[in-house]
Image: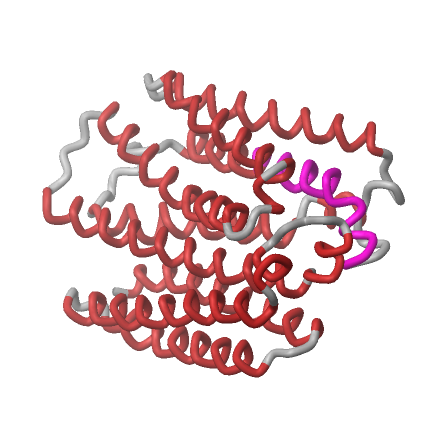
Amino acid sequence: MRTFFKMIRWPNLMMVILSMSFLLFLLIRPGLGLVVPAAGLSLTSFLLLVVAVLLTAMGGYVINDLKDLQTDALNKPGKNAFGTTFTGKQGWIFYWIFTVGGILAGSLLSFLLGKGSYLLIFILTAGLLWFYATRYECQPLVGNLVVAFLSALSFGLVWLYELMALQAHAVQIVHPRLLLVNELVLIYMGFAFLISLLREVVKDIEDVEGDRQTGCLTLPVIYGIQKAKNVAIAVNLSGLIASFAIQWFFYENGFNVLFLFFFLVDLLFGLVLLKLMNAVRKEHFSLLSLWIKLLMVAGVLSMGLFYFE
């Protein structure tokens, strides 16, 4: 059972649940001034959305592990569940159950809201995860950008389906509130994109030896570790500049608690930058991945602070 939960990356899934819940209940709803429980997505609809995202992500993790058996044997021996605890055949069964389940949950939600064509979002997401595992992962930056885009998409989906539900209930929203929430959602989508991109590039540097031996042509394999580090530094600097800009946005809009909290985010970006510039060995980059996860956690927790504004 422990191996199964490691296979589906349960800490990542918990982060998804937390971020989607915080976004809807502590940012979007208060931001729109919604006090009527029936307005927007019902709890059942929201749970369907979360299940759809989680199952699709789980399918992506499984196929990624199936395709990375050789590379993982070199980069992290014994940690890939397939070939040890589970067989490849069992892996494919898991993959299809999770992926089809995610598409079905997303389709049901879309039809319930009268937007059946939106099921294509989940089909395309599953397709992107398939192509990531089979093709894009071993292309410089392409795979990194796909993962970063999908990380940001989970935030966008909450806002998209909440808007559809509000339209279905004919709820009238004051335009300035709608504009503000839209800006906030875009801010967090951008934040998720940059942090995920940074983490993916750092992971590629960490796994460079195994990728090189298995012919996986990632950024550090083709252009070298130093150039890959320069890309990671550029992404980190972009994140730091974005953090300053977000802080200013919070200050101008009277979000004082968030303005103060983002000094912590600035500090974390600064620490990651320093550690990145001095990183040389594999263990340095492994530690960097943990610091970047802390940045992700800080970003998610900041959404909860809207409740106190």
Residue 3, given in percent of the width and then of the height, sits at 80, 47
Q: Is residue 17 visible?
A: no
Q: Residue furthest front?
A: 223
> Residue visible at 18% across and 26% down?
170
- The total of numbered circles placed on residues is 0
Judge whether residue 160 can be spotted in this image: yes
Nearest the eye: 10 or 27: 10
Can you say which quadrant of the picture contains the N terminus?
A: top right
Quadrant where the C terminus sits is bottom left
The spot of residue 280 in percent (x, y) is 64, 78
Picture quadrant where residue 291 is located = bottom right
Whether residue 226 appears in magenta in the rendering, the answer is no
68 sits to left or right of 130: right
**Residue 267 location (% of width, % of height):** 42, 80
Residue at 85%, 38% (x, y): give it: 86
Which of the 4 image quarters holds residue 76? bottom right
177 over 266 or under it: above or below: above
Residue 77 image offset from top left, x and y in percent: 84, 57
- Image quarter for residue 69? top right
Identify the residue at horizontal 42%, vertical 54% (top origin).
193
The residue located at (42%, 29%) in the rendering is 45
Q: Left or right? Give the position of 79 relative to 125.
A: right
Q: Nearer the viewer, residue 72 or 118?
A: 72
In the image: residue 117, left or right of residue 201: left
Q: Given the current orientation, which residue lies at the most extreme right position?
A: 84
The colour scheme applied to this rendered structure is: secondary structure
* Secondary structure mostly taken by the magenta-highlighted segment of the chain: helix
- Relative to residue 308, is residue 216 depicted above or below? above
Residues drawn in magenta: 55-75
Q: Is residue 57 magenta?
A: yes
